[in-house]
Amino acid sequence: MTAQVHVDIQVASDSKQLPESSDIECWAAAAVGGNRDEAEVSLRIVDLEEGAELNFQWRQKEGPTNVLSFPSDLPEELNLPLLGDLVICAPVVEREAKEQGKTLTSHWAHMIVHGTLHLQGYDHIQDDEAEEMEALETSIMQTLGFDDPYQVREEI
């Protein structure tokens, strides 16, 4: 069973290659799976400058990153469907897709799945956590009709 997921999308990017909101909701819903009946996610799509500012502010790392995840910290008794906020830097996603030999659509799907899993408490800091998260991401991506996002592409 797949959850009903609503994604509130804010676009603060000049990119002309953004996915459709219906695709974003589909990818997020696949990542939520049967973990809950409904979920809400806020997604802000940014350019390099804002991506770098947020990455430094929240992770003390220089330069933009592909996705930042901010899980909601609501008391359980509120029983609200809010998972949290995602920030995705469009130019980084576009550059990575090209570098990794992936379609832009598949990389966007992976970033939405990856970020949505982070909102649910998955992480990849420890090796065992990384293996679990990557296996789950691969399974979700393949269910969505995409290739394994961690498969190394051979240069042709």
Image (cartoon, rainbow, N blue to C red):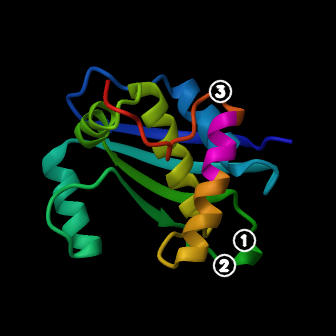
| Circle 2 residues within 10 Å: few <14, some 14–19, many ≥20 | few
Q: Which residue is mark 3?
A: 145
Q: In the drawing, what numbered circle is on residue 60? A: none
Kindly report which numbered mark, 3 or 1, lies closer to the viewer in this rendering.
Answer: 3
Q: Is residue 19 left or right of residue 129?
A: left
Q: Is residue 67 magenta?
A: no
- For marks 1 and 2, give the CA distance: 6 Å
Q: Is residue 139 part of the magenta span, yes or no?
A: yes
Q: Which residue is mark 1?
A: 78
Label at residue 75: 2
Q: Amino acid at mark 1?
A: Leu
**Span highlighted in magenta in the image:** 137-142
- Disc count in the image? 3
Which of 57 and 130 lies nearest the eye of the viewer? Answer: 130
Label 3: which secondary element: loop
Whole-angstrom CA distance, mark 3 to mark 1, is 36 Å
Q: Which badge, 3 or 1, comes first in the chain's sequence?
A: 1
Q: Give the class, few, some or many, for how many residues have Cα within 10 Å of label 3's Cα (few <14, many ≥20).
A: few
Say whether residue 120 is visible.
no
First along the sequence among labels 3 and 2: 2
Q: Is residue 134 above or below residue 4?
A: below
Q: Which residue occupies 24% across, 62% down?
A: 54
Work out how far the residue at label 3 is from the one at label 2, CA to CA, in angstroms: 36 Å
**Left or right, 138 with reference to 47:** right
Q: Amino acid at mark 2?
A: Pro
Outermost residue toward the right?
Answer: 1
Q: Are marks 1 and 2 in contact (CB under 8 Å)?
A: yes
Position of 70 with respect to 77 (left or right) is left
Question: What x and y, as percent, mark residue 93?
Answer: 32, 39
